[in-house]
């Protein structure tokens, strides 16, 4: 009955050698037995069984009534499942941001969709492979891994296509050996888009046996994907911001960051080193005059500004002000010319550098002789 989904009637369970609980019903003194399935769609969610102490022949009227009872119980089970699914769905998409978010999401997806596997993957730099951010197998989180996209159903997903294989996915994608190893028959994958429409990664749910309601499974994957995409975009934006923030810190030259009103937000170690070399602990005191005005002008014009400053008689510093208009921020990079100018003077005194001023005062040479004053004298 579990396979057929049809009611069953056994006039005498004791006489039926195939009855699985023959010994139990004999001890209880039971004889006739009939059962009807509890159906949720086409799935047999359970069985309703009845027994009688006497042998009874099948009664079609009783079977019809009990079949209707099974249908009504199936609707109750279906409603209960829907409530549990909505609860799991709400928990999954409302999880906190952070490192454990993706693990929580795939766990709730697998539970809600009754999937054997669920994963969230991020496209690697070459966009030809995926690095998983969370993988749920058998309702447990397993270690992440990388896998190439070529010859997998995920390849279609990363091309901005929602992908669903209700059954026979191994035959449809024979190159994907992972599906064979995991004995996957049903596959649902959806791309994860950022706010500009770019594919950042993918969300996948897989089953060893086709789920009872394929449409619900597909809808769940798409709902969870919206929340996963938002978190993945937030993650990548944060990582980019952290990387950019480390660039000024690692720069060997002084770097400062200013707000739109000229307020100093950040100064790297090299800026403090320059300040100390000029006899001060306050990096703001080494800035060019009217730095706030320079910052404002750069943001309004969108153009970089260049200032040559001499904070001391023997020191020359070039300041480059670079505006980031979108963020209302200006970065100032300082480069000290002092050592370069000193080296230039030394090389000029040693004759390695031509003094262009003196060269302009020298008499012009003729292409036809040593000077332009007259014809070349004859050689005796």
Image: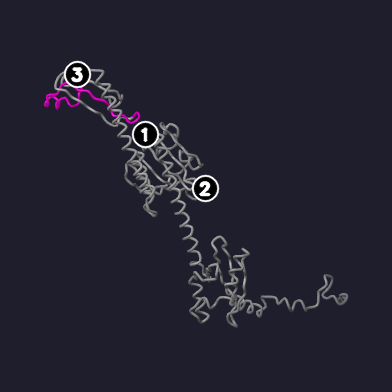
Question: Callout 3 environment at 10 Å: few (<14), some (14 to 19), or many (20+)?
Answer: some
First of labels 1, 2 by sequence position:
2
| x then y, percent, for residue 68 | 29, 25
Placement of 314 over or under 145, stated as above or below: below
Give the numbered dot on residue 342. Answer: none
Which numbered mark, 3 or 1, is in the foreground of this view?
Answer: 3
Check disc 3 and report the residue beneath it: 11
First of labels 3, 2 by sequence position:
3
Nearer to the camera, 301 or 376: 301
Q: Quadrant of residue 21?
A: top left
Which image quarter is the C terminus in? bottom right
Between the residue at mark 1 and the residue at mark 2, the CA separation in whole angstroms equals 30 Å
Check disc 1 and report the residue beneath it: 211
Between the residue at mark 3 and the residue at mark 1, the CA separation in whole angstroms equals 35 Å
Residue at the bottom extreme, as displayed: 313
Residue at the top extreme, as displayed: 57
Q: Which residues are magenta?
A: 16-42
Which image quarter is the N terminus in? top left
Q: Quadrant of residue 225?
A: top left
Give the numbered dot on residue 198. Answer: 2
* Circles 3 and 2: CB atoms closer than 8 Å: no
Number of callouts:
3
Nearer to the camera, 285 or 249: 285
What kind of element bears circle 1? loop
First of labels 3, 1 by sequence position:
3
Residue 251 within the magenta-colored segment of the rendering: no
> Is 66 placed left or right of 173 in the picture?
left
Between the residue at mark 3 and the residue at mark 2, the CA separation in whole angstroms equals 65 Å
| x then y, percent, for residue 274 | 52, 76
């Amino acid at each position: 009955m579990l396979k057929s989904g049809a009611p069953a009637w056994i006039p005498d369970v004791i006489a039926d050698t195939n009855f699985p609980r023959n010994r139990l019903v004999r001890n209880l003194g039971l004889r006739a037995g009939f059962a009807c399935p509890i159906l949720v769609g086409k799935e047999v969610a359970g069985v309703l069984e009845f027994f009688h102490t006497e042998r009874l022949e099948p009664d079609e009227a009783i079977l019809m009534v009990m079949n209707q009872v099974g249908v009504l119980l199936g609707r109750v089970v279906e409603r209960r499942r829907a409530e549990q699914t909505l609860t799991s769905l709400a928990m999954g998409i409302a999880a906190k941001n952070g490192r454990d978010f993706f693990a929580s999401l795939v766990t709730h997806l697998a539970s809600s969709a009754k999937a054997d596997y669920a994963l969230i993957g991020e496209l690697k730099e070459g966009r030809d492979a995926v690095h998983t951010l969370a993988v749920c197998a058998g309702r447990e989180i397993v270690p992440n891994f990388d896998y190439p996209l070529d010859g997998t159903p995920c390849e279609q997903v990363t091309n901005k296509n929602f992908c669903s294989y209700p059954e026979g996915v191994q035959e449809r994608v024979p190159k994907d050996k992972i599906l064979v190893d995991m004995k996957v028959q049903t596959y649902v994958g959806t791309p994860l888009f950022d706010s500009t429409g770019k594919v950042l990664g993918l969300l996948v749910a897989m089953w060893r046996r086709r789920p009872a309601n394929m449409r619900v499974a597909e809808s769940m994957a798409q709902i969870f994907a919206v929340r996963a995409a938002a978190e993945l975009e937030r993650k990548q934006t944060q990582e980019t911001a952290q990387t950019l923030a480390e660039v000024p810190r690692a720069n060997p030259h002084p770097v400062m960051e200013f707000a739109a009103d000229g307020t100093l937000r950040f100064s790297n170690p090299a800026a403090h080193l320059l300040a100390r070399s000029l006899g001060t602990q306050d990096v703001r005191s080494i800035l060019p005059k009217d730095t706030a005005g320079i910052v404002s002008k750069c943001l309004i014009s969108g153009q970089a500004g260049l200032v040559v400053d001499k904070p001391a008689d023997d020191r020359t510093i070039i300041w480059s002000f670079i505006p980031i208009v979108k963020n209302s921020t200006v970065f100032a990079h300082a480069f000290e010319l002092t050592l370069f100018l000193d080296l230039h003077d030394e090389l000029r005194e040693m004759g390695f550098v031509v003094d262009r001023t003196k060269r302009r005062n020298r008499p012009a040479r003729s292409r036809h002789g040593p000077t332009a004053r007259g014809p070349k004298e004859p050689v005796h």
